[in-house]
Image: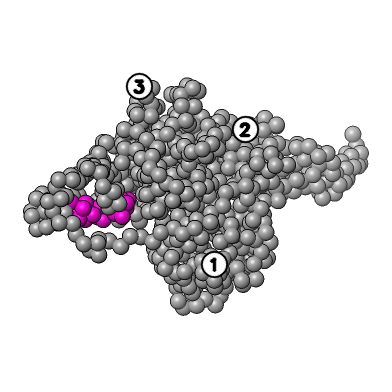
Amino acid sequence: MTTVALVALFVVVLAVVALAVIIVWPWMRIVPESERIVIYRLGRFRSIRGPGLTVVFPWEQLERTIDARNQPTEVEARVFAFGVPNTVTLSFWYSFDPARAVGRDREKLSRLVQLSEMERRSQMEIMVRDSLGTQVSALEEDSPLPKDATIPERALALGVGKPRCAKLLTWLKRDLRRALPSLGIILDDSHNIVFSGRRISPEIIEAFSRNRSRTLNKEWLKQNADELRGLGLTNEMLAHMLASSTEGVDAGHLQKVMLSGAAATEVEVGMGQGNETVTTAVKQEAQSARPQPPAQETEPVPEHLTERDLAVLKTVPRAENRRKSA
Amino acid sequence: MPLKEIPRYRPTYREDEIRLIARLALRGDSMGFVGIAGVGKSNVVNFLNEGRIGEVAGKEAEVLLFPVVDGTYWQRTPGSLWEMMLDALKRSTKHLPQPQQDKILPMDQEERTLDKLRAMLEWFCRDLKYKVVFVMDDFDEVFKTGPIEMLELLNGLRSEGNREALSYVVFTKRLPHVLGRTHNLNIENGSKFYDLFSKDIYALEPYKPEDAYQMLVHLNEKDGKPLQDAEIRQVFRLAGGHAGLLRTVFRIWADEGTPNGDPTTYFVNKHDVREECRRILAHLHEDEQAVALKLARREDVAKQKPVVTHLARRGLLLSKQTNYAWFSPLFGRFLGTL
């Protein structure tokens, strides 16, 4: 081929390429590393593209852009662990990568990309909380605490650095690694899941000191009951002293039951964590031998519920009742 | 694949309560729920917090946001309440565009928090047109302790241009105005905050049979199906629709196997069941406790008929023609042992 022909051929090829680039250029997209684009064709899901240079043809639509960054997040959850309520904050790293999560299954890909960020986030939180609850239950079975474990021991069972905590986080990571891809989410294995925050109810913290003082009160009253009776304190007074230092027992209720007048009345009062009970006995013959305290020395009776009070509460309207009346 | 096949909630979980909340909240109205201890208040709160109201109440309810404030963590100061409300609002709007930070902030910490709360409410309610419904869970102590000025500020947040877009759903174990007797909430001009929901205080009753059954089936599935269907129904019969008792009885049955002899006698002697029943009783008002004990001892309660009706309204008693039955045979038997 002569030089002229070669040059002419070269020019033609160059022109064709240039024309192609000019035509295709507006359809070209540069997708950053942190993003992916969802392509629909004639209204149906076609593919996920990126990162890098990609072409979106005129008969295709760029339906949405998805954030594919590897990013940290936190999910707060409330969970009962070993009988103690905890509010924990779980921290982990993840990325939304549906192609990696479900491979080439176009139907699954199509479903995943239709979720909005908000919906996916919400479902992820539900899944994390659910998994946490399941793994805590499994941990309680696998590594139970002794039946007589105190509240502090129960509260500290999931302390950071404790073997149970490490086991829980390992199981949680394994479970989420398996489950999160159903949302197109990939857990970043290079970062551990950690508890970045944990709160225990102030009631539990109060219970530490209350438990201690309750035990002391009970022991002291038991040991000194005879001496106290000798000083003129009646069984009712002793029971009231004990009840008023015992969490969850209504002192007024206890008093009313005891004063309601059976020949021998026994009241069993559950003391909380253990199986301890306190039994107080009022025997008719013992009562008659001992002078009753005057009425004004007892605790004032709590304010009663009036008819006006009781009229406040309503019943939730039920759909089945409305259907019946219709 | 989803983690579990049996969902925790049916599509119509607490359908009537959820629809009621949605209906009132969409109007910007507040309300209260009074429920016995362990009846499942927290499950309703979690359901709202997870943004699932649309599943029961329809798409129009998706404009509702439910930040949850847990009253058990309240530090007994107004400042801590504002902090909790601000945190709750931030958590429930994490997925939404956030407002610009105000560059001029008050020096006082409490004022600063309140200002941020107001700014966020203005942004979400007025600018983004959402309706914010603060869920005040376990609010008994707040009503009891006050101060009244703090409660009135809750109404004040509404008055600042958010009237139809900000409301409250309050959960307590006792009637709010009885808890807050010292503040005279229910007298005329007593409390504008209380007036917001005083006409809409509802009893949160134990679960309907379908919801209780769903809960048990879910627990059973999670646990590897230790119970047969007939046993699940037995658990429901013993515990009524009370979430705490359902969980406790199920746990004992799953751990210890089918009870020997009469199941009611067997379970009422279990420590955990007695604890749960004790908790229910302890959180009732003294008058409710007294009438409950009288009913258990089959004494005459003709003079306390309004309290009996009140207990029935709370779901503790089920009306059966000429007399009443307890929502749970276990609870009835427990009362009888006192």
- At mark 3, the secondary structure is loop
Q: Which dot, 1 or 2, sits closer to the camera?
A: 1
On screen, residue A99 above or below B304: above
Three-letter amino acid code of the residue under disc 3:
Gly
Q: In the image, residue B154 lies at what x, y percent? A: 53, 67
Along the viewing direction, whichever of A307 and B272 lies nearer the viewer: A307
Q: Is residue A217 left or right of residue B125?
A: left
Q: In the image, residue A291 lies at what x, y percent? A: 15, 56
CB contact under 8 Å: marks 1 and 2: no
Identify the image quadrant of residue B299.
Answer: top left
Judging from the image, mark 1 belongs to the subunit labelled B
- The structure residue drawn at horizontal position 25% and vertical position 39%, both measured from the top left corner, is A275
Q: In the image, residue A287 lies at what x, y percent? A: 16, 50
Q: Is residue B245 left or right of residue A204?
A: right
Write down the region rendered in magenta: A235-253
Residue labelled with disc 2: A102
**Which mark, by number, is residue A305?**
none
- The structure residue drawn at horizontal position 46% and vertical position 78%, both measured from the top left corner, is B107
Marks 3/2: CA–CA distance = 53 Å
Q: Is residue A237 magenta?
A: yes
Q: Main secondary structure of the magenta part?
A: helix
- Colour setup of the view: one colour
Q: Is residue A247 left or right of residue B190?
A: left
Q: Which dot, 3 or 1, sits closer to the camera?
A: 3
- The structure residue drawn at horizontal position 49% and vertical position 67%, both measured from the top left corner, is B185
Residue labelled with disc 3: B261
Q: Is residue B212 left or right of residue A49?
A: left
Along the viewing direction, whichever of A126 and A265 lies nearer the viewer: A265
